Image (cartoon, grey):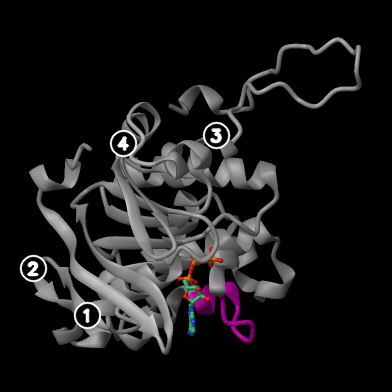
């Protein structure tokens, strides 16, 4: 199993981390590393402990055992306000405050941090350009934005303070397939351009493979395998790995057709050539 992060500086290190909710063992003791400057994905089916893990990284919950280290320091010992300014958190459907305009959502933390109006305007314009959101959309409330626009606003909000790390918690799962595809490509471009460290939580192997350098596959609160997609595909640690990979349909899989119908070759979707 290739441990890419071992050879590089780590932004996060989890050592013997476990989490219980009462009698539920959401995470069994696990050790994992997130390399600086890379995207690391934690993948697994529903209930495998992915959300619990990202909440631990964000410092939103405490581990029942073990330590979550950020640049070698225990997250539990860091000042929560300054720590959260060092990480950008993107959640499903943007997680925007409904009573604030998109612009007010994006600038909320910068206002708390005492930024000037000019500095906020300049940063908002820069980020709107980065995520391809028309500036006019920023004056609307979240309810008046499409799902894709809300998620673009969520990404702007996460990037506003230029954090060292981005945490993506199922960021594309509420989007329709075309918007999802486009936004995955845009996020990959943004991450390549900004060279930030990132953690992605997803149940979608294709998404993880497309966006992440390093993959951890989880099941029932345990890490089953760590490596690149090719490691999981070529040397699966467990029959579950093979089943999980087989369950994600490749782009060139034949579509269901009525018996006897001619099956034309599938055209590559826009941007597919950029995908590994
Ligand atoms: N606050 C909580 N109280 C009790 N049990 C919880 C709590 N949060 C999560 N769990 C349980 O912990 C286990 C892991 O849940 P978690 O949400 O981390 O998994 P997940 O992989 O993110 O699932 P999904 O993809 O469905 O969101 C599940 O059995 C879940 O029911």
User: Could you tell me which quadrant the N terminus lies in?
Assistant: top left
The residue shown at (51%, 22%) is 273
Would you place residue 162 above or below residue 80 in this image? above
User: Could you tell me which quadrant the C terminus lies in?
Assistant: top left
| Location of residue 109 (image quadrant) | bottom left
The residue shown at (67%, 60%) is 147
Percent coordinates x, y for residue 22 in the rendering: 42, 89
Does the magenta segment cover residue 101?
yes
The CA span between labels 3 and 1 is 34 Å
The residue tagged 4 is: 228
Mark closest to the chain's N terminus, 1 or 4:
1
Task: Tell me whether the residue at label 2 lies in contact with that at label 1, contact meaning CB atoms closer than 8 angstroms.
Answer: no
Residues packed near mark 3 inside 10 Å, few (<14), some (14 to 19) or many (20 plus): few
**248 sits left or right of 237 in the view:** right
Does the magenta segment cover residue 106?
no
The residue tagged 3 is: 246
**Local secondary structure at mark 1:** strand
The circle on residue 72 is 2
Mark closest to the chain's N terminus, 2 or 4:
2
The residue tagged 1 is: 65
């Amino acid at each position: 199993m290739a441990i890419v992060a071992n050879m590089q500086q780590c932004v996060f290190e989890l050592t013997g981390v476990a989490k219980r909710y009462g009698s539920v063992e959401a995470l069994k003791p696990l050790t994992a590393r997130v390399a600086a400057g890379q995207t690391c994905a934690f993948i697994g089916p529903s209930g495998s402990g992915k959300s619990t893990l990202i909440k631990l990284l964000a410092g939103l919950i405490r581990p029942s055992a073990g330590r979550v280290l950020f640049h070698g320091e225990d997250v539990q010992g860091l000042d929560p306000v300054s720590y959260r300014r060092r990480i950008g958190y993107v959640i499903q459907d943007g997680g925007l405050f409904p009573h604030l305009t998109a612009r007010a959502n994006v600038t909320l933390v910068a206002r708390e941090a005492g930024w000037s109006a000019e500095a906020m305007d300049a940063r908002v314009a820069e980020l709107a350009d980065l995520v391809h959101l028309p500036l006019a959309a920023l004056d609307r409330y979240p309810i008046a934005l499409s799902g894709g626009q809300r998620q673009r606003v969520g990404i702007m909000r996460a990037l506003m303070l230029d954090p060292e790390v981005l945490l993506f918690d199922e960021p594309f799962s509420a989007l329709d397939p075309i918007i999802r595809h486009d936004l995955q490509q845009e996020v990959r471009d943004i991450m390549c351009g900004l060279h930030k460290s990132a953690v992605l939580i997803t149940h979608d192997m294709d998404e993880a493979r497309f966006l992440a350098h390093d993959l951890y596959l989880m099941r029932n609160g345990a890490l089953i395998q760590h490596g690149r997609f090719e490691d999981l595909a070529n040397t699966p640690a467990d029959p579950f790995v093979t089943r999980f990979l087989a369950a994600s349909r490749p782009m060139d899989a034949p579509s269901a057709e009525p018996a006897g119908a001619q099956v034309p070759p599938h055209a590559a979707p826009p941007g597919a050539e950029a995908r590994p």
